[in-house]
Image (cartoon, helix red, strand yellow):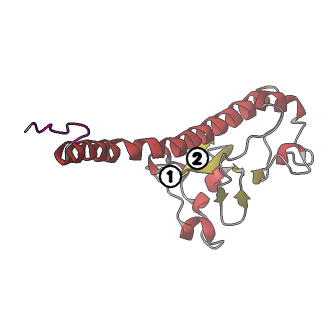
Amino acid sequence: MNKNKNTKGFTLIELLIVILIIGILAVAFLPTVFGAPSKARDQARLADLNRIQKVLVAGSLQGVPVPGADACLDPTATAVGGILEPGEGAWEPLLPDLGGTLPTDPSGRTVSDGTLDCAGTYLFLSDPGATGTYDFGLYSTVENTDAGNMACTLEALGDPNVDPWDLDAEDALAGSGNCFGLLQSL
């Protein structure tokens, strides 16, 4: 009697080992893979704010005054870029440096100072902190707290009776949180 052993396929132990290895790799790498898009959007937000800051500073050096009123930087506003205030100067020459229009938040997040709710846009504050130390500030919410440099709690940003920008500007931007702010003196 000749018994041929069927050796096609994997044993149960071999299959369990492969499943275990795949599970370990998934636990190790999936959080990194799934966190990458939000980190990329945060980097885009920071790059947008830096670019707007550079254009505002360049305009100031060319004699274009920085707007004197707080505003959402809305490219669909009737004023040029949403930041042109009557009598504040022409921003048209600076818009090409921003790609012809103001950038918007990559995922449409809202940033608020308790008075302005900037949905999908960035927040511009003239004289942030009301200390006279800074000429303007640019703000955005971020998805990852490690990308932020300030806290933006619902109580502080959503309550019109609490104005976080009345705090000392350096203290407001110390630490980390779900907001990112740039302060600029000219």
* Element type where label 2 sits in the image: strand
Q: Position of residue 36 (x, y in %)?
A: 49, 41
Q: Nearer the viewer, residue 17 or 175?
A: 17
Q: Residue furthest left?
A: 1
Q: Residue furthest front?
A: 1
Residue 44 at least partly seen:
yes
Q: Quadrant of residue 18?
A: top left
Rendering coords of residue 29 (x, y %): 36, 41
Q: Are marks 1 and 2 in contact (CB under 8 Å)?
A: yes
Could one spot residue 63 in this view of the protein?
A: no
81 over 115 or under it: above or below: above
The amino acid type found where label 2 is placed reads Gly
Q: In this rendering, would 103 be left or right of 146?
A: right
Q: In the image, which disc is placed on residue 150?
A: 1
Query: In what element is the residue under mark 1?
Result: loop
Confirm whether the magenta stretch covers residue 6: yes
Looking at marks 1 and 2 on the same chain, the residue that comes earlier in the sequence is marked by: 1
CA–CA distance in space, label 1 to label 2: 7 Å
Residue placed most toward the observer, 1 or 148? 1
Identify the residue position indicated by label 2 in the image. 181
Q: Residue at x 22, y 48 (%)?
A: 16
Is 12 situated left or right of 115 in this image? left
Q: Main secondary structure of the magenta part?
A: loop
Q: What segment carries the magenta color?
A: 2-10
What residue type is disc 1 on? Met
- 179 above or below 6? below
Task: Name the foreground residue: 183 vs 177.
Answer: 177
